[in-house]
Amino acid sequence: MDWQDYISVDPDICHGQACIAGTRVMVTVVLDNLAVGLTAEEIAEAYPSVSVDAVKAALHYAAELAKERIAP
């Protein structure tokens, strides 16, 4: 899965916060819902414009941001 197919950052949408592409549902909203124990299916049901794959992409995006990188 390529999270870039599901996540967009546009300065004109939600003040440039990462969102599920084509929506105004911020990645942080998806992650907050996962953190309190909702499943990807429950999130997709609560936010009909968000697919289960988009929820998974949000998690991949967060994992990518969490990777530590050391610049040479």
Image (cartoon, rainbow, N blue to C red):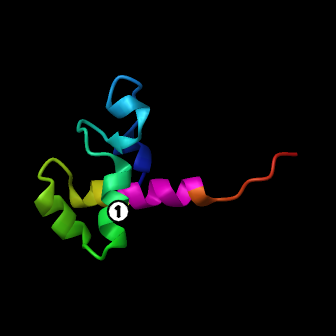
Q: Badge 1: how crowded within 10 Å, few (<14), some, or many (20+)?
A: few
SS for dot 1: helix
The reply, left or right, for residue 54 in relation to residue 66 is left
Question: Foreground residue, 40 or 31?
Answer: 31
Quadrant of the image containing the N terminus: bottom left
Q: Is residue 63 magenta?
A: yes
Residue 28 % position (x, y)? 38, 53
Amino acid type assigned to the residue bearing label 1 in the image: Asp
Question: Foreground residue, 26 or 22?
Answer: 26
Q: Is residue 33 magenta?
A: no
Number of marks in picture:
1
Relative to residue 59, is residue 8 depicted above or below? above
Q: Main secondary structure of the magenta part?
A: helix
Residue 66 % position (x, y)? 59, 59
The reply, left or right, for residue 13 in relation to residue 69 is left
Relative to residue 13, is residue 69 depicted above or below? below
Report the magenta residues as a range: 57-65
Q: Which residue is mark 1?
A: 32
- Residue ID at (41%, 25%): 11
- Residue ID at (33%, 33%): 14
Residue 27 % position (x, y)? 36, 50
